[in-house]
Image (cartoon, rainbow, N blue to C red):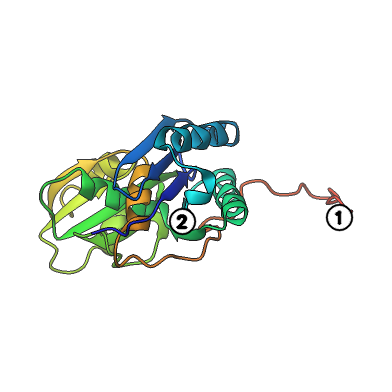
Amino acid sequence: MGERLNVLAVDTSLRACSAAVRRDDGEIFAAFRAMERGHAEALMPMIADVVARSGLGWPQLKRIAVTTGPGTFTGVRIGIAAARGLALATGAALFAQTSLAVLAAGAIARRDSRADAMLALSDARRGECYAQVFRGDARPLSDARLLPLAKAVSLLPEGTRSVVLCGSAAHALAESASDALPAIAAIDDREPEAAALAMMAAGAGWTSLDAKPLYLRPPDARPQPGMALPRRP
């Protein structure tokens, strides 16, 4: 059972932008758009839309939820900055989870039965993935990791008989490591969705992470040799 409180959730961590309000009566108002870039321009109108449709005023929001990554550098920063600003303006408490936990929770919400484990996998390109393993109820069994796609299977606990693969790299792992995987109960290749995060933020027993970026890869952009870095004013 979830708590009776109004939650606003946002996600801009990967290849989509989404926002959702879970009202204290359990009804959810959500918006989602797949996109590679443009999250900063899309997010605030999306937030305004879901809050307006929920019929709530800003002071009625009691919790602001956000994904911390792993994901793109720009996307993660956009979501966390927006959540922190809204929490400061409204007095709401912050709630944070990894993008991979939100993938797992969303996959569970769309299924009637559970597997022994959930393996959330987001394509990190260069033959790598962001991966994290969860129990069948989406409770984490490992930390989020950056590793070669083929090695993601090694994160599964010994004795796992069935697994749900979720995230943008789920199909790729199923195709490349089918012999090493236990029975695949389902493949869910969606991006993280704020609606799932909103349900987590209102759910009993979920502990918030620190609302700070979770970066597992150094930035691609590096100063050129001999290039002077800008001085701080």
- Is 42 on the left or on the right of 178, as rendered? right
Instruction: Give the residue at mark 2.
Output: 63
Task: Please tell me which residue is depicted at 58% across the width and 50% down the height of the picture.
Answer: 86
Where is residue 176 shown, x and y percent of the image?
Answer: 25, 44
Q: Quadrant of residue 189?
A: top left
Q: Quadrant of residue 101?
A: bottom left
- Is 212 on the left or on the right of 232, as rendered? left
Where is residue 219 shown, x and y percent of the image?
Answer: 61, 51
Instruction: Give the residue at mark 1.
Output: 232
Can you say which quadrant of the picture contains the N terminus?
A: bottom left
Can see residue 178? Answer: yes
Secondary structure found at label 1? loop
Q: Earlier in the sequence, mark 1 or mark 2?
A: 2
Q: Nearer the viewer, residue 47 or 38?
A: 47
Q: Give the Cα distance between marks 1 and 2.
A: 34 Å
| Circle 1/circle 2 CB separation < 8 Å | no
Relative to 58, say whether 49 is above or below: above
Task: Please tell me which residue is depicted at 79% across the width and 50% down the height of the picture.
Answer: 225
Q: Nearer the viewer, residue 112 or 185?
A: 112
- How many numbered marks does the figure carry? 2
Amino acid type assigned to the residue bearing label 2 in the image: Arg
